[in-house]
Each structure stands twice: as C-alpha cells, then as structure tokens.
Amino acid sequence: MKNLKKMSLFLMLAAVMAFTAACGGGDNGNGNGEELDGSVVIDGSGTVYPLMARMAENYMGEQENVSVEVSRSGTSAGFKKFLAKNGTDFNDASRQIKDEEKSKAEELGIEVQEMKVALDGITIVINKDNDWAKELTEQEVKDIFLASANKKKWSDVRADFPNEEIKTYGPNENHGTYEFMFETILEEQDLPENINLQQDYSTLVDLVSKDKNAIGFFGYGYYESNQDKLSAVKVDFGKGPVEPSLDTIKEDGDYAPFTRPVFTYLNVNQAKEKPQVLDYAIYTMNNAQAVSKETGFAPLSDEDIKSTLDTLNGMKK
C-alpha cells in the first residue's frame, strides 16, 4: 500500500514537472531547450533608439543572462559599424539600406535581413511662444527648409507673419531623418546654408525650446516626449491641416507625405552563429506593435509583422 502511494506521488510530481516545462516555466532559453547567454550589440538611428532601448530593457528582464547594448550614432554612421568585420549585430535605421551599403555587405560576405519595425512621422516643431506658424501648408514647410526658396524671415513665408529671422534646425547628415528630409521631402534640393544641424536630438529639443523664431524637424517620438517644451505644426497637404499623431501617421493616412517606415537590420551570419541574436530579432518582431506605441511610433500591420517573423523563424536550426 505504501509503495502504491509513493508511486502515485511520483507520477503526480512528474506530471507537474512536464506541464511546467511545456509552459516554459523556469526556462531561460530560446524555446529549443538551449540556454541563452552572451551579448547583442545594436547601433544606428537616433530616431529608432527609444524604441530599441525599451525593447532591450524588456528583453533583458526576461533573459537575465543576455546583455543587450544599444547605441545611437545615427543611421549612416551605424551602417559603417554594422558593415565591418566583427561588426554590430543590428543596425537601427530611419531609412532603407542604400545600394552602396548593400554592395559593401556583399563584399564582406554579410547576409543582411531588413526588419521593418514601425512607422514614424517627420514632425515640424516650433517654440511654444510661436503663435503664428501653428498651421502651415506642405509647400510652406518645404520653402522654409529650401535654400532656393530664400525664405529668410517669417514675413517671407506669409506677409502677416513677424518680420523676424527664421532659425532652422535639424539632425545632421549622420541621421536617416536628415536624409529623408533631403531626399524625399525636399527632392534632393539643398537646405539653407545657415541651418543648425545637430547630432543629438535632445540638443535640438533644447535649442528650439529656447528660440521663439526656431523651427525644426525630427521624428514624432521626440516631439511626443517633449510636448511640454515644443509645439507641433499642423501641416496642410491639400485637405486641411493635419496634426501628427499615432492615428494620422500611416503610409496611406492623412499624414502620409511625411510618414516613413523605420527599420532595424540584422546580420544574418551572426544570428546563425549566436542564438541570442536570432532570439532577440524574433522577440523584437513579436513585441514591435506594443513597444512602438509606448515610444511614439505608429504600429505596423499584423501582415507586416507575420511576414518578417516567418523569415526569422526560418533561420532556426
């Protein structure tokens, strides 16, 4: 009788252990029974940085033996670190990879996987005390940032605007945001010679917040987290002024002309060699929609997420 009780207790414990294992309880691995440790190194876009920094923080909360390092040298500078021998595992980018960067990857034998993670809106910001330029047409915005338009004073934009010098600000050439403004919005026409371009976005926020005649541009997330210091310009694309928001920032929405996808690029070679890198890539896509909304980005569609996840899951051994 005692042996029967012992056997029953053993079977119950075995069942509990099997159920716990099936649910992943106590597993610090990647779902394949493999323990995860080591590091994941990420650099690139300052725009994408808040999203990826939050993602890394969340991931390390679940994978205590994996260290995720996120830096923000800018999209173009980040690609130089990514496309190098023993380069970074990921490069965050606020633009797509360029042909010359693809050629560099091929030259080095690096397989690159594009991961679209969210949508961002180029946001035109002004000083809180600016009460005249709260609404501008798309062309007026372009003219302010075009050297050829020669809009040096606010009164050059509209006659009833102040007769004060316009102070333009933006991120420097290291950033994909600068390239999107130059290449897509301004159609590769020069920005004003006296525009103040900065590497650090927090510096831009500070400069615009202290200058009544300032107007600048950067990603929506930096505006959203600094609404107490800045105002966002409502842009009229032909159907009335549109305020940038998570509802209007869509590739087919009201703010579409100033909307762009943002990315992270994965070094597939390293993902195949280091399980934690592939696991982080999959985790990023599984959580992209939630984290994007938390950090000032519009989320992708379920279809976009599934497509990338299918590709990543196909890399598993």
Image: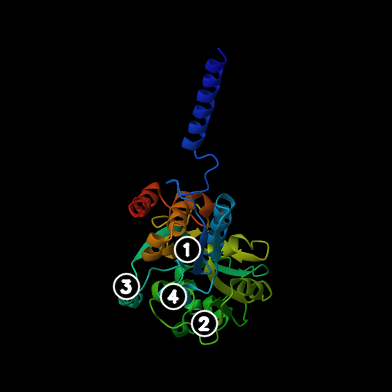
Name, please, the residue furthest toward the bottom: 193
Graded by Cα atoms within 10 Å as few (under 14), some (14 to 19) or many (20 or more), the crowding at tag 2 reads: some
Q: Nearer the viewer, residue 45 or 198?
A: 45
Identity, as a three-letter code, of the amino acid under mark 2? Lys
User: Mark 2 vs mark 1: which is more N-terminal?
Assistant: 2
Examine the rendering and report whether any part of residue 163 can be seen. yes
Q: Which residue is outermost to the top?
A: 1
* Mark before the other along the chain sequence, 2 or 4: 2
Instruction: Select label 2 or label 4 by which is in front.
Output: 4
Residue wearing tag 2: 151
What residue do we see at 39% from left, 79% from top?
Answer: 188
Residue beneath disc 3:
109
Secondary element at tag 1: strand
Which residue carries the number 4 mark? 179
Residue plotted at (51% across, 82% down): 151
Amino acid type of disc 3? Answer: Gly
Question: Which percent across, then down, holds residue 190?
Answer: 44, 83
Q: Nearer the viewer, residue 10 or 24?
A: 10
Residue 64 at what x, y percent from top left? 58, 53
* Number of the label disc, if any, that sits on residue 247: none
State which mark lies toward you, 3 or 2: 3
Would you say the residues marked 2 and 4 are in contact, meaning their CB atoms lie under 8 Å apart? no
Residue 214 position within the rendered picture, expressed as x and y whole percent measured from the top left? 61, 76
Residue found 55% across the figure and 65% down from its top: 69
Query: How far is disc 3 from disc 2 in space, using C-alphas?
Result: 47 Å
